[in-house]
Amino acid sequence: MARVAGAAGLAIEIQLIPGPTDMQIKPILSALRHHKSGTLLIALQIALTLAIVCNALFIIQGRIQRLSRPTGIAESELMVVNNKWVGRLTDAPARQAADLATVRALPGVADAYVTNAFPLIGSGWQSGIRRSPTEKNLDSGTAVYFVDDHALSTLGVKLVAGRNFRSDEIGSLEENGSPDAPTIIVTRALAQSLYPDSEALGKLIYIGTSDARPSTIVGIVEHLQSPETGAGEDDRWKNVILVPMRLTSAGAFFVIRAKPAQLQTLLKTVPTALKANSTRRVIPEPHGVITFAQIRDMAYRGDRGLAWMMGGISAILLVVTAAGIVGLTSFWVGQRRRQIGIRRALGATRRDIVMYFLTENILISVGGIVGGVVLALVLNRWMMMEFETARLAAIYIVIAAFILLALGQLAVLAPALRASRVPPVEATRTV
């Protein structure tokens, strides 16, 4: 408090902003107690923003990680035809063989094979696997792709150990059969999961039912993604088994690899050739014939949308919070012009005034951040229970807190600079 003599000789007490000699936390806290409503409002706004933003950043990062998963295949050269046969299915293997011969003979086709599923399709055949007949399933949801000896060259998958299938190893399988082929190829991630302390090549595993025959791992590919696109905390999306069989079902996918610059042409010539080969089929619209780039786009459309939505919500909250800080600080500057003017008259520099408001804002922000951390953990706990999300990592809280601190200081800077320009003459106008 400072005592200033008025015109009538009376002493008038005025609460002053601390200057360079008394710039301490206690006087600032004392001033904030006179503005409890505004202080609490901004602190609560910061707390809510922190809780939402750090969880939003966590969700966005998870979606970006999912979008960035490598499939392990030559995506830019691949197309898929969703083929559904009509009529009796007893001749399905013969139909598939004839169609493949037709497709592989087309100009511009590098290779092709028929399968039940492929990366990013969203669903497919899953089976339990074990290393011995009596062992409990190590994983009940390992992806199984039914392929032939052309699959690796079509997909562009790299074989890192062992060999490819031979043409005489390709069998057929009914929809409710067991995928326990004598030979199989697995991804390196699955091989390491099954045999972490030894070489998986040449080892036996059991796929499917409890009475399944043993399957020998004859090849290991570097990487191949499962059909699933869901979020998971583990690496199960890297676990894939290639089984040398063709499903005798009404539907199948022709996966075709185009020669350079031939993909767009094949999108027209392949379905035409298939229909000319046999009209006993349906290629559904609009996605019966599609490039893998389009498959990736559709597979992750929801993830991209969620990421953009969460980013937009975070941006709006940050803007609203910054606007609230600017508005409240501007209001306080207007209320304190007399104190600022008197302090300037007593020797406070512009820097002293700016530092006062910056320090005041830091104290409010820190209080809001402390409350926001608690809210963020509560919100994450609820999301873990309701949506099975992962536990929020501390780094996201730190990042969100830093963003809010920096944003708050930037937001208060303009009003603080305006306050620093209040002339000392204001003291004589307001006393």
Image (cartoon, grey):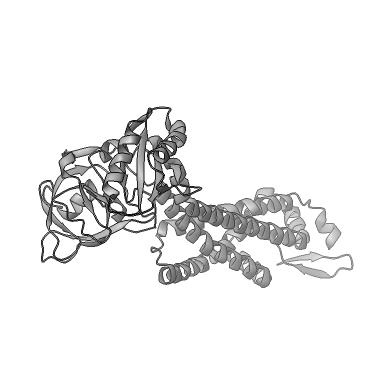
Which is more toward the observer, 241 or 250?
250
Which is more toward the observer, 146 or 85?
85
Residue 5, above or below 195: below
Residue 4 pos. (x, y %) = 79, 64
Q: Residue 126 sits in which quadrant?
A: bottom left
Q: Quadrant of the C terminus?
A: bottom right
Residue 81, above or below 356: above
Could one spot residue 187 in this view of the protein? yes
Could one spot residue 23 in this view of the protein? no
Which is more toward the observer, 234 or 120?
120
Residue 337 pos. (x, y %) = 77, 59
Q: Is residue 213 left or right of residue 234?
A: left
Q: Quadrant of the N terminus?
A: bottom right
Q: Residue furthest right?
A: 8
Residue 406 pos. (x, y %) = 56, 52
Tally of numbered discs: 0
Residue 415 pos. (x, y %) = 70, 53
Q: Is residue 362 left or right of residue 85?
A: right
Residue at screen point 50% across, 69% down: 375
Which is more toward the observer, 365 or 280?
280
